């Protein structure tokens, strides 16, 4: 799982925060999948003493699915790997801002006169 996350950070520009309207990458360990979701809202879970949030999102699957996960800030901002139902998960927002929203290595490779290389993350 850690190796997949390390590769994601090489390929995508990822944000340190997660806001309404962000597209997030969700990685699951078993089965190994990578999916996307649109964040549609946050609501504080007042039933818990610690700070937990209901994260409302639209999974960008076929068909699209509305889901609500209850997570801590560290979990929905990619600061930690967490488990749901005994399975490891990782959740982080993609940074689409500005002209450099492609893979981190793309700009370096273009400066060297090389074409960007597509990478397969397993």
Image: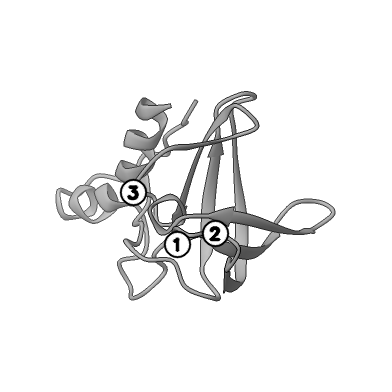
Of the two numbered discs 1 and 2 in the rendering, the one whose residue sits closer to the viewer:
2
Report x, y in % for residue 41: 61, 74
Report x, y in % for residue 42: 57, 72
Of the two numbered discs 1 and 3 in the rendering, the one whose residue sits closer to the viewer:
1
Q: Is residue 115 above or below residue 21?
A: above
| Label 1 close to label 2 by CB (< 8 Å) | yes
Q: Is residue 101 above or below residue 27?
A: below
Between the C-alphas of marks 1 and 3, the distance is 15 Å
What residue is disc 1 on?
Answer: 51
Between the C-alphas of marks 2 and 3, the distance is 21 Å
| Label 2 close to label 3 by CB (< 8 Å) | no
| Label 1 close to label 3 by CB (< 8 Å) | no
Numbered disc 3: secondary structure: loop
Between the C-alphas of marks 1 and 2, the distance is 7 Å
Q: Residues within 10 Å of mark 3 (few under 14, many from 20)?
A: some
What residue is disc 3 on?
Answer: 79
Query: What residue appears at the point 53 percent right and 75 percent down from the top-left corner?
Result: 20
What residue is disc 2 on?
Answer: 48
């Amino acid at each position: 799982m850690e190796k997949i996350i390390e590769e994601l950070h090489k390929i995508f520009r990822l944000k340190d925060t997660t806001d309404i309207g962000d597209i997030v990458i969700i990685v699951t360990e078993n089965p190994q999948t990578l999916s996307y979701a649109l964040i549609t809202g946050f609501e504080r879970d007042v039933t818990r003493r610690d700070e937990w949030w209901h994260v409302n999102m639209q999974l960008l699957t076929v068909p699209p699915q509305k889901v609500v996960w209850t997570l801590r800030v560290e979990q929905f901002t990619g600061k930690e790997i967490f488990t749901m139902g005994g399975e490891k998960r990782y959740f982080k927002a993609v940074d689409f801002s500005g002209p450099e929203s492609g893979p981190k290595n793309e700009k370096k490779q273009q400066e060297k006169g090389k074409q960007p290389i597509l990478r397969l993350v397993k």
